[in-house]
Image (cartoon, rainbow, N blue to C red):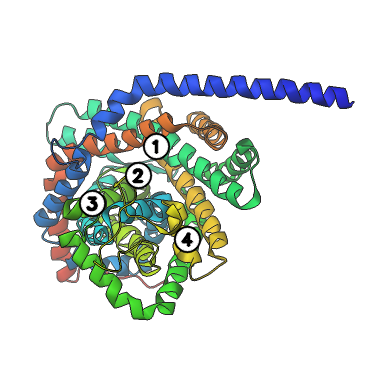
Amino acid sequence: MLLTIATTGMAGAANAQEAMTLDQKVNDIFAAVTGPFVNLIFAPIPGTGFPWIVMWLVIAATVFTIYFGLVQFKFFGHAIALVKGDYSDPNDAGEVSHFQALATALSGTVGLGNIAGVAVAVGIGGPGATFWMILAGLLGMASKFTECTLGVKYRNEYPDGTVSGGPMYYISKGFSELGLPGGKILAVLFSIFCILGALGGGNMFQANQAHAQIAGIVGDYPGWITGIVFAGVVFAVIVGGIKSIANVTEKIVPFMGILYVGAALIILLVNYDMIGWAFGQIIGGAFTGLGVAGGFVGALIQGFKRAAFSNEAGVGSAAIAHSAVRTKEPITEGFVSLLEPLIDTVVICTMTALVITISQQLIVDPVTGLYVLNEAGSSIATVGGVSGVALTSAAFGSAISWFPYVLAIAVILFAFSTMISWSYYGLKAWTYLFGEGKNSELTFKIIFCVFIVIGAAASLGPVIDFSDAAIFAMAVVNIFCLYFLMGLVKKELVSYSTRLRAGEIKKFKH
């Protein structure tokens, strides 16, 4: 018996070594094939170090903010009323409420980027990166407004009450309505990128990071176990469609948001005397750099980059979730969606940045008052030399010793919620390409869950890089098309605001 176990053990070790070698070979081949595409999407503007894709998103957000007359501020109060259900007619076509649509879209964007990504941004760009992150978040509200209005306006409504919407529909239909060529081709291109992004960044990366966080607390164990558990739970939710997803997200998103923001507020209250200093660091660092890596430009790049990567404004993904809302006024979901970057970037990301700054995990030179760079000179030196999610964990743990456990719960919830939302995004892109129907939908849902197990079990660096690039390639197609279609949104805005002022838009009692 012992001999059998020993032999099996040696064979298992040999197989594992072969598998690792095979994994490495697959990774190397995949990296070589996809590398040029990844490098193209994330290439910096010559001489700046500023990724052109981030500038593409920020310029679009600025254009939409100006074109729609600061819509994110003018209609903020009305957006809150819509989420509360004040104007919701239960007889309108659609599958979910305004609040459920917002929660589903938020569950896709509020994720590990809010925890780990912000720590990276502040670690490289200093607290000043937070200022530019907030600014980009506020501008991004206008991008969400534009794409989500179009999502509802051009969605498909079916006899059984289900709907399908998103950029692939408004690109093909909108271009056709305006007599512009190429709409179908651009819609297909967007759908392909969306499926790739859903399987990678919206799925495998989430499963991989969730497993790493769990293993860090309970000890190392095979990733496929985490993958199978996640796949089972995710499948149980997504098999019921958007209504099932929305029923889960409307409960889990407020809970995980309150859990995370609540913990951050406790730390801010404990260190209330440092809040003024922290905001001084944010404002000062935004314009002077305070001696951080890259100075002022480094802070600006990191802030804009984190906001763009976190709230996905302009990517077009959220328009797919918002398209399922119950309404006959497309513009109303545009108003609701503009709350998304506010919650994701301006509130949650800022909380992370404030806690990291106030907890003094970033090392400051006591003589000059400037931040000390690490040995490589690439980022700010931190207590314990940690970065990313470990830096956030250390920042919270400095005030609450058991917070790493809360963070683990938050990471698991964030990963799970991102997966179920992105499964819906990928599904709608899939059915656009391969047709609606139960069999087509079930096929994609099974594929999606298989990729959860793969993501949790394997080290897939190049795959994740490629899927991230695919998500931002969605933004290239989407924003290009939004410039042609934004005039249609302007008509909707003028019509609705005129009727709202005239008292023609009625409230409903519930």
Say whether residue 493 is left or right of residue 318: left
Label 1 sits on residue: 428
Graded by Cα atoms within 10 Å as few (under 14), some (14 to 19) or many (20 or more), the crowding at tag 1 reads many
Q: Residue 34, position in %: x, y?
A: 34, 23
Q: Foreground mark, 3 or 4?
A: 4
- Where is residue 308 shown, x and y percent of the image? 27, 48
**Mark in the foreground, 2 or 4:** 4
Residue 95 seen in the current view: no
* Disc 1 and disc 2 in contact, CB within 8 angstroms: yes
**Which SS class for mark 4?**
helix
Looking at the rendered structure, the kind of residue marked 3 is Phe
The quadrant in which residue 69 appears is bottom left
Report which residue position mark 2 lands on: 320
The disc, 1 or 2, on the residue closer to the chain's N-terminal end is: 2
Query: On the rendered image, what quadrant is the C terminus found in?
Result: bottom left
Quick one: label 4, few (<14), some, or many (20+) residues within 10 Å?
many
Give the CA separation, mark 1 to mark 3: 29 Å
From the image, tell me which residue sits under label 4. 394
Q: Tell me the mark number nearer the camera, choosing from 4 and 1.
A: 4
| Residue sitting nearer the eye, 7 or 213 | 7
